[in-house]
Amino acid sequence: MTGHIRKVGLATALAMASFAAQPALADSAGVSFWLPGIFGSLAAVPVTPGWAYSTIYIHLQEKAGAGQNFVTSGGVPGSVTAGLNAHADVLVMGITYTSPMPVLGGQAGFTVLTAPGNIGVGIDATLTGPRGNTISGSAADNRTTLTDVFYQGTLKWNQGVHNEMVYITGNIPSGTYDSSRLANLSFGFPAIDVGAGYTYLDVKTGHEFSVVGGLTYNFTNPFLQYQNGIDFHVDWAASQFVSKNVHVGVAGYFFQQLTDDSGPGAKLGGFRGQAVGIGPQIGFMIPLSDGYQGYLNVRGYKDLEVENRPKSWSTWVTFSVSQAASAPAPTKPIVRKY
């Protein structure tokens, strides 16, 4: 088993798969900046230095019954709606550069990405506007637009089967946010997320387990005068290599809002959200020519429990291209002269 090549190759591919733009309904509609499940297998494993490119298709379906309330825009900034049904399809395009020079004894990488996509949103009834006016009925919106520009910096270390990582990520508002629309793929405000992760990877047995935790700070949405609270999240994944180029496993997440939402637009009070989800995954390493390799990963998640968030399921299909690890130099036999 070519353990080193497999380890570095899959890690490079999954490093791109671990970060993707989030389809947003509105920042306060029970949807956070952080999309649970972003980090997956091999998240903390150092990769082959150089450039890597990834395309990630994400389908997200969310639904909340008429008994659940959310603050949305939809032409009435800060309005409270009852019930929510939304879907999003986005094609994330990102590029990563990993430096060959050590930084603090680790490996530094930087990713930039954005995504075009389509989002459709429907609400059952608008109950109360920001000035106390009452509006009844249903509303729907469908839009093809762009996400914000996202960035991520990572620093990774390796000690045998143990791998550690710290990261920082955030967004640069793209200007496509429209507070008069229900459907937005951008947020209308910046956010910053920092965290750390660990991956156990034994190339002899094929066992792998990854866990990444972080905190999100959201700035105020000036259009809605609404600020999300601080979020805590944990993504995890476990997999088994069933062959040199194939691994299968499960992945999941835990999301908990730690502090209350705030601002004049926070008509529902603290509105702290929570979500727990799980799903299967499978990955394929694909050898390419000219020193490059591909990686195809398919995984899905379904919420098991939510609070103050729509219940969702999502499908992720990732294809990444990166430089392949160099084959180890052949060892010459020792010739003794007597």
Image (cartoon, grey):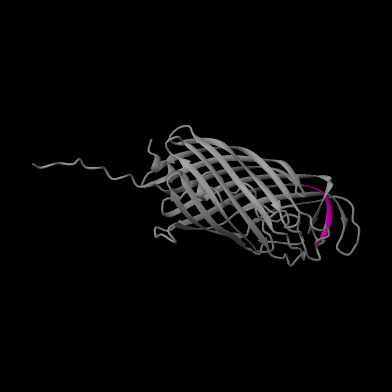
The x and y percentages for residue 25 are: 72, 53
Residue 150 visible here: no
Residue positioned most to the top: 242
Give the mark count.
0
Which quadrant is the N terminus positioned in? top left
Looking at the image, which residue sits at the far bottom?
A: 222
Would residue 79 be counted in the magenta stretch? yes
Question: Looking at the figure, which quarter contains the C terminus?
Answer: top left
Q: Tell me where residue 138 appears, x and y as whole percent.
A: 85, 50
Give the residue drawn at x 46%, y 36%: 206
Q: Residue furthest left?
A: 338
- Which residue lies at the image location 62% right of the left edge and 40% below the top edge? 300
Q: Residue at x 91, y 58 (%)?
A: 134
Residue under the point 74% across and 51% down: 273
Q: Write down the region rendered in magenta.
A: 78-84
Q: Nearer the viewer, residue 293 or 11?
A: 11
Instruction: Please state the horizontal and vertical placement of residue 222, each as a whole percent of the image.
Output: 74, 67
Residue 74 appears in the picture as rendered: yes
Q: Please say whether residue 82 is one of the residues in the magenta stretch.
A: yes
Residue 294, given in percent of the width and then of the height, sits at 45, 44
The majority secondary structure of the magenta stretch comes to: strand
